Image (tube, helix red, strand yellow):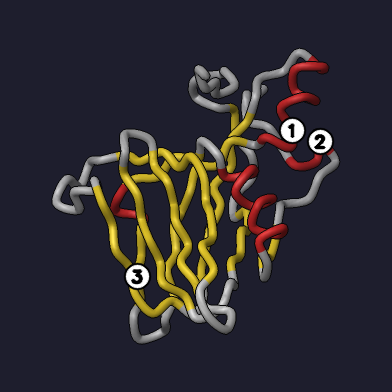
Amino acid sequence: MTDDARFEDGGEAPLRLLAFDTDDLKVISALTQDAIFPITEMSWQPGQRRFALLLNRFRWEDAEAAERRGRPVERVQAVLSVADVAKVRSQGVDRSQKDLVLSLLSIDFEPGDDGTGRLLFTLAGDGAIALDVEALDVTLQDVTRPYVAPSKTTPHHPE
């Protein structure tokens, strides 16, 4: 018997969500809160105007069911990609530290003119990544099966 969770256990399919407005983005932000990723899993492809992160996402959508059924909470690997990216900047992120693991707290959008704007990824420890975009076009897609969260606990945020 394995401890790995399976999509069949929960009867759920992998997530694939798109955000083209701020309401959609709020859903993706909530589902990626407390996602962790190695700094090496950040990818900026200026020629394709694409930014992507390979996240180990906490499965917030399953946490209540896991508690109710007395089983461990889960994480899943997911790709968070942003199209139409013109510029990427970061603060408090040392890309030379190849073993650095970052934790995503939230994703917000600051609108500009004519649909342009800035996506702001707020990271634990005062880090941030800012993407200047020509339009809001964000995709979140699970790419592996869920697995038992190594900590076996639900993330908490002291107020």
Are the residues tagged 2 and 3 within 8 Å (C-beta)?
no
Q: Where is residue 85 shown, x and y percent of the image?
A: 43, 76
Q: Is residue 39 left or right of residue 26?
A: left
Q: Quadrant of residue 48?
A: bottom left
CA separation in Å, label 1 and label 3: 30 Å
Are the residues tagged 1 and 3 within 8 Å (C-beta)?
no
- Label 2 sits on what residue type? Gly
Q: Where is residue 102 shown, x and y percent of the image?
A: 35, 41
Q: In the rendered structure, find residue 44 and report the number of the disc placed on it.
A: 3
Q: Is residue 101 left or right of residue 58?
A: left
Question: What residue do we see at 48% from left, 62% from top?
Answer: 119
Q: Is residue 38 above or below residue 44?
A: above
Disc with the residue nearer the chain's start (2 vs 1) = 2
Disc with the residue nearer the chain's start (2 vs 3) = 2
- Label 3 sits on what residue type? Trp
**In front: 107, or 2?**
107
Q: In the rendered structure, find residue 62 and report the number of the disc placed on it.
A: 1
Question: What residue do we see at 35% from left, 49% from top?
Answer: 128
Disc with the residue nearer the chain's start (1 vs 3) = 3
Q: Is residue 50 left or right of residue 126?
A: right
Please name the residue that numbered disc 2 is placed on: 10
**In front: 58, or 84?**
84
Question: What residue do we see at 78% from left, 50% from top?
Answer: 13
- Which residue in the rendered view is the most extreme toward the front? 113
Between tags 2 and 1, which lies in front? 1
**In front: 114, or 43?**
114
Q: Is residue 76 above or below residue 49?
A: above
Question: What residue do we see at 59% from left, 72% from top?
Answer: 137
